[in-house]
Image (spheres, rainbow, N blue to C red):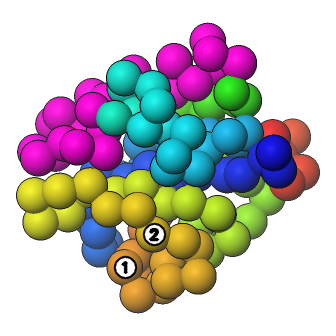
Amino acid sequence: MIPTTADFYDETGRRARWLGALHGNADPETLRDLDTGRLMLEATDPTTFADAVLDLLDAFTEQGLGQSHPPRDGWPWSWPDSRSTDWIYLFDRGRAWVITGRIWSYAMPRVDHPPQRPAATGHA
């Protein structure tokens, strides 16, 4: 399987908060196979979604699916926003959404990210 990247946000628009990232088998089908991924994808409120994302970041690495990047570690990518990210998971209007980076500018016109890691050179 070709590694994919994923970013997670608690809502859309300018007030969206980046919740972390994954690099590895981060596609929706793989994440749905994890209890925490399924909880995130089926969330009906923003708190459940955000909590499930935090748990997913831990479970993803523990299951050997790739690397997780919590916000405390900074923005992991060499690109400035999620336009170049394969999968974007976000919560909006009472449900979780999965979009691709190609439509990032429509869903998220401008989001401030944590500082980039000094050693970021692309996929972490």
Q: Magenta stretch: residue 58 in it?
A: yes
Q: Quadrant of residue 79?
A: bottom right
In this orientation, which residue lies closer to the viewer: 117 or 57? Answer: 57
Q: Main secondary structure of the magenta part?
A: helix
Per the image, label 1 sits on a secondary structure element best described as: helix
For this orientation, the residue located farthest to the top is: 62
Residue at the (37%, 23%) spot, across then down? 35
* Residue position marked by numbered label 2 in the rendering: 99
Q: Is residue 92 left or right of residue 80?
A: left
Per the image, label 2 sits on a secondary structure element best described as: strand
Lower sequence index among marks 1 and 2? 2
Q: Is residue 57 above or below residue 21?
A: above
* Residue position marked by numbered label 1 in the rendering: 107
Q: Amino acid at mark 1?
A: Ala
In this orientation, which residue lies closer to the viewer: 12 or 6? Answer: 6
Q: Is residue 110 above or below residue 49?
A: below
Give the image location of residue 88, x and y in percent. Answer: 49, 60
Gap in angstroms between the C-alphas marked 1 and 2: 9 Å
Could one spot residue 80 in this view of the protein? no
Highlighted magenta segment, given as a residue range: 39-64
Assess whether mark 2 and mark 1 are in contact (beta carbons under 8 angstroms).
yes
Tell me the crowding category of disc 1: few under 14, some 14 to 19, or many 20 or more residues within 10 angstroms, Cα based: some
- The quadrant of the rendering that contains the C terminus is top right
